């Protein structure tokens, strides 16, 4: 230890003058959680977040998803769960701030409403993605148009009515 | 002059709040009263409110420097209940990160021990070399601590081909430096004067108080979960279980430093083994957890981490019981301190590598 | 420069304003080896200590003038006086600083000097050590008390070899004044090779005297939270740390004067080199315990110093 | 000593008082014993130099249960005994295993189990004036 102590007098120090010299995080670092453009506003990340840092709120005709970096524990569960890579953990780690607003990351999505009861179905983007993923699976084509913009409970009522009519016709 | 010196909740030698009332006659320690509970956050109650998947991340944050031990113990207990065998590669992946954490945790302890007995330089050098391991952990898992590496049924990320070469070079540096530190600890006369013969824990007391980990192994009581109850892939790699007999502070230091060399050997064998296994096959989907109960045990850097998990068929655990190694080691502290002088109290306290946030949960 | 050997009157002629009155004592008390020079050197020593220590530990380390910044910062902070602490709590640092500042005035670089000023140096250095202990006791905290008692025990431990080696030097130079000793060395060559054992004994006492590892037991941060310093804050702490820093400079230069003297600029350089040596010793050794330090000083160093004393006397 | 052989020995020792047992994966064995007989089992374990890992407390609804976790190489034994919530009295084992004292203190303050003649029944983690039992569920 003695020799090393003496020799390190003439060596460059190991420490980095961090705020003045950059010290970037490596690739793959789990830093600031941010929504990407592919986010469709389905809210899966909010359901799975261990720290309940992601909140989903429907205001009027828009749905607001908000990540609170004060609560977020940067575990990456949301990133793994999101089917459309709508949320990701960037490599930014300098999140100290005095302004409370910068602690959040928000994204807004336009909602679509059910013709039957006027309730919220989901966001428009989400509906497009669903249509896209089930277009080759396909419902019975003739019914597609009628129930396309009904919310789940109205769909149930619609099918129930259809079946009861079919049974009453049958008997 | 009979005095009560309080190594109080806030003390320089203790990194975390814990109170030791030391009754001394002059400078000789006569009796020690231990008070725990300053770090109690009710994690076991909180664990019952979250799903199994979320609990892994909660349990990982019980402690900052053993954030691989609790998740591994917890996931193994849940996997036992679900009757799931995780893929071979996942076992190796978990073991590599576990051993990397053992290295950086032991290096952390060695630095703090050197700083407590007064050599700041050794503290700076050891923590400099610890950075190599932490950088590798950051590159592989995405964070220096809190690796979010486990899920029920396997791992969440993989160690790909490009991670291994830098990992092996970092290990070379760590191995060379650890041998240098072992020599520094043993040869430096002032360190020997402080560590040899102080804080002696006889083998009989170590066994009677059921101490665990390096604290027990330094007193000759051979308990090592990696050998007794082989989990992960410890039965497929060969490594030596280091058991010494003196039971003083120097023995505990030697055990930890030698264990770093063993961990380096384990990681080398593990990285060779995962080359042969198919990349990407790292997790098995687990649909639901039947009602049942099981025990997850894991050899953390400080000793045996013990998780008892009871499930009731829903996705929320019925009961999660966590017991950290320091919980049993701390009960051996009074017998260790008896008869030493006041100057030896901080180093003897630190010699069990206490992690009070684990103890209090 | 200052021809130190000649009586005071001649030196005065070098100072024009001196014609009005004998201003030489004020200069040597206030400026050259006195307050100004010592405080600058003290801050320099402390700054060097932190910078060199950092560099040896692969760190960048604070700027050289950091101790000066600390001093100013501490003065601006308010100083809390514990309820249980006595009146000496305030006076201990002041007396410690005062007693340590007296010693440099007697240095042979243009300072005053009189017959037995070596005895004054020994006595005054002990006063500052005792004041440290008094500060600890009067602070009313158990850590302060333990620190104080350790300081006193350590004082007894290193007092024996210190006194013996100083007496050996005095007998060798056949004069009890620093100027005399310096003169003798200038004539007959440095003492460190003529009195090797006394020199080793004296150099080994220095870490204990100024509280550097391996003997900084009284201020063991990790064990008793800085011992006597635990309850001090604000200007009281500023004075105490400044007194300690002055002690760094004073004790090192005392060693240089007693054993390595040739002339005044060589005195400064050797002072820095010796200080580098002690920083090096500090960073590679752990803190020993009180009983170990007692054994070390009384048995080994005491006998060494005694051997040299006997050799000189015969 | 294998799991089956261990259960046989227990049956011999306890007879009817061995209420139920269950052998899980990886040598995990859980044994339920009638309240009061657990001390003889623990002293038998002590003769075999078993290692006491921890004592967990579980809330079964109408009963409070203590699980003594022992490691008898190669087995990992969970010795269970329970008492009704109305009268949750369970004998201490801290005279056999001194480290059990702390685990029992924790069970007392968290679950409200009253450990009979425990040497030092103070609170361990919770503040002294805290009266509720946080880990109770029902």
Image: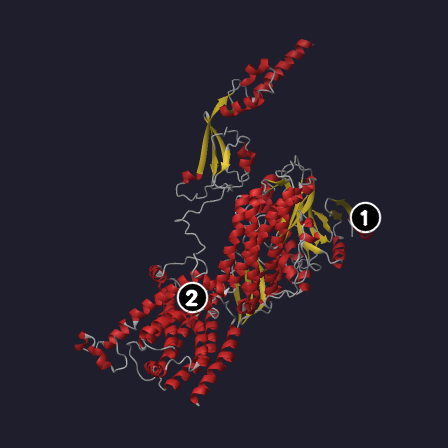
The scheme the figure's colours follow is: secondary structure
x, y percentage for residue C191?
Answer: 39, 81
- Is D73 in front, or is A24? A24
Q: Quadrant of residue C96?
A: bottom left
Q: Secondary structure at mark 2?
A: helix
* Gap between marks 1 and 2 measured at Cα: 68 Å
Q: Nearer the viewer, mark 1 or mark 2?
A: 2
x, y percentage for residue A78?
Answer: 54, 36
Crowd class of label 2 (few under 14; some 14 to 19; many from 20; radius 10 Å): many
Q: Which mark is residue C229?
A: 2
B16 relative to C28, above or below: above
- Looking at the image, residue B237 sits to the left or right of residue C280; the answer is right
- Is D54 in front, or is A78? A78
- Looking at the image, residue D114 sits to the left or right of residue A87; the answer is right
C43 relative to B81, above or below: below
Residue carrying label 1: D16
Q: Quadrant of residue C244?
A: bottom left
Residue at image coords 71%, 48%: D83
D123 relative to A154, above or below: below
């Amino acid at each position: 230890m003695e020799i090393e102590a003496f020799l390190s007098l003439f060596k460059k120090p190991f420490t980095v003058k961090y705020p003045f010299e950059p010290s970037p995080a490596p690739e793959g670092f789990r830093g600031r959680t941010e929504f990407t453009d592919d986010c469709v506003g389905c809210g899966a990340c909010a359901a799975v977040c261990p720290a309940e840092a992601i909140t989903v709120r429907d205001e009027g005709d828009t749905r607001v998803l908000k990540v609170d970096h004060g609560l977020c524990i940067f575990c990456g569960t949301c990133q793994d769960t999101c089917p459309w890579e709508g949320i990701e953990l960037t490599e930014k780690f300098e999140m100290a701030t005095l302004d409370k607003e910068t602690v959040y990351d928000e994204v807004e999505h336009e909602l679509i409403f059910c013709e039957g009861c006027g309730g919220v179905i989901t966001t428009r983007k989400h509906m497009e993605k669903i249509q896209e993923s089930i277009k080759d699976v396909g419902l019975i084509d003739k019914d597609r148009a009628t129930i396309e913009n009904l919310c789940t409970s109205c769909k149930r009522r619609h099918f129930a009515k259809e079946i009861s009519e079919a049974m009453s016709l049958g008997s | 002059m009979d005095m009560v010196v309080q190594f109080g909740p806030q003390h320089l030698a203790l990194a975390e709040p814990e109170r030791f009332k030391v009754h001394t006659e002059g400078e000789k320690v006569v009796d020690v009263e231990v008070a725990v509970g300053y770090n109690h956050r009710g994690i076991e109650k909180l664990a019952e409110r979250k799903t199994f998947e979320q609990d892994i991340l909660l349990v990982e944050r019980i402690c900052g420097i053993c954030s691989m031990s609790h998740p591994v113990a917890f996931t193994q207990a849940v996997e036992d209940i679900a009757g799931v065998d995780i893929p071979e590669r996942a076992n190796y992946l978990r073991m590599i990160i576990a051993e990397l954490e053992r290295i950086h945790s032991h290096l952390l302890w060695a630095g703090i021990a050197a700083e407590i007995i007064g050599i700041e330089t050794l503290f700076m050098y050891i923590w400099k070399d610890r950075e190599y391991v932490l950088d590798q952990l950051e590159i592989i898992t995405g964070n220096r601590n809190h690796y979010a590496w486990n899920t029920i049924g396997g791992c969440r990320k993989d160690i790909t081909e490009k991670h291994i070469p830098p990992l092996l070079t970092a290990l070379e540096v760590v191995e060379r430096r650890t041998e240098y530190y072992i020599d520094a600890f043993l040869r430096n006369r002032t360190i020997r004067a402080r560590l040899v013969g102080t804080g002696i824990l006889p083998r009989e007391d170590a066994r009677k108080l059921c101490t665990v980990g390096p604290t027990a192994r330094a007193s000759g009581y051979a308990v090592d979960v990696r050998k007794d109850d082989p989990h992960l892939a410890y039965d497929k790699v060969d490594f030596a279980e280091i058991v010494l007999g003196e039971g003083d502070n120097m023995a505990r230091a030697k055990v930890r430093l030698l264990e770093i060399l063993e961990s380096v050997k384990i990681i080398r064998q593990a990285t060779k083994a995962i080359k042969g296994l198919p990349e990407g096959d790292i997790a098995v989907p687990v649909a639901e957890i039947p009602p049942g109960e099981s025990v997850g045990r894991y050899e953390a850097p400080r000793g045996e981490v013990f998780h008892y998990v009871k499930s009731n068929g829903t996705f929320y655990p019925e009961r999660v019981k966590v017991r950290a190694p320091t919980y049993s080691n701390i009960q051996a502290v009074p017998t260790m301190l008896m008869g030493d002088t006041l100057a030896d109290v901080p180093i003897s306290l630190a010699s069990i590598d206490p992690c009070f946030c684990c103890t209090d949960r | 420069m200052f021809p130190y050997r000649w009586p005071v009157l001649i030196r005065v002629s070098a100072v024009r304003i001196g014609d009005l009155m004998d201003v030489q004592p004020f200069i040597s008390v206030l400026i050259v080896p006195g307050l100004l020079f010592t405080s600058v050197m003290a801050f320099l020593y402390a700054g060097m200590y932190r910078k060199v220590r950092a560099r040896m530990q692969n760190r960048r380390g604070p700027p050289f003038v950091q101790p000066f910044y600390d001093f100013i910062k501490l003065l601006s902070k308010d100083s809390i006086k514990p309820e249980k602490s006595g009146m000496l709590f305030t006076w201990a640092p002041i007396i410690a600083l005062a007693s340590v500042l007296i010693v440099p005035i007697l240095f042979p670089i243009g300072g005053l000097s009189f017959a037995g000023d070596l005895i004054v140096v020994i006595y005054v250095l002990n006063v500052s050590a005792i004041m440290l202990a008094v500060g600890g006791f009067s602070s009313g905290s158990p850590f302060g008390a333990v620190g104080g008692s350790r300081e006193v025990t350590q004082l007894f431990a290193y007092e024996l070899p210190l006194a013996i080696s100083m007496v050996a030097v005095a007998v060798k130079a056949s004069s009890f004044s620093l100027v005399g000793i310096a003169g003798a060395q200038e004539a007959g060559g440095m003492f460190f090779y003529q009195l090797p054992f006394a020199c080793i004994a004296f150099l080994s006492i220095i870490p204990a005297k100024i509280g550097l590892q391996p003997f900084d037991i009284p201020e063991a941060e990790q064990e008793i939270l800085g011992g006597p310093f635990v309850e001090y804050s604000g200007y009281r702490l500023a004075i105490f740390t400044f007194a300690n820093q002055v002690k760094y400079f004073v004790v090192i230069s005392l060693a240089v004067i007693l054993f390595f003297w040739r002339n005044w600029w060589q005195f400064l350089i050797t002072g820095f080199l010796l200080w580098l040596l002690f920083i090096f010793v500090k960073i590679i050794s752990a803190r020993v315990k009180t009983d170990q330090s007692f054994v070390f000083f009384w048995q080994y160093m005491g006998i060494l110093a005694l051997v040299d004393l006997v050799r000189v006397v015969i | 000593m294998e799991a089956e052989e261990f259960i046989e020995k227990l049956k011999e020792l306890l007879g009817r008082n061995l209420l139920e047992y269950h052998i899980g994966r990886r040598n995990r064995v859980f044994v339920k014993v009638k309240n009061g007989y657990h001390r003889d089992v623990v002293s038998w374990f002590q003769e075999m130099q078993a290692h006491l890992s921890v004592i967990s407390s579980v809330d079964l609804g109408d009963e409070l249960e203590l699980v003594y976790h022992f490691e008898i190489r190669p087995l990992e034994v969970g010795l269970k005994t329970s008492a009704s919530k109305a009268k949750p009295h369970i004998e201490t084992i801290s005279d056999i295993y001194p480290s059990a004292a702390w685990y029992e203190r924790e069970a007392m303050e968290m679950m409200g189990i009253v450990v009979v003649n425990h040497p030092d029944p103070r609170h361990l983690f919770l503040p002294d004036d805290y009266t509720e039992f946080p880990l109770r569920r029902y």
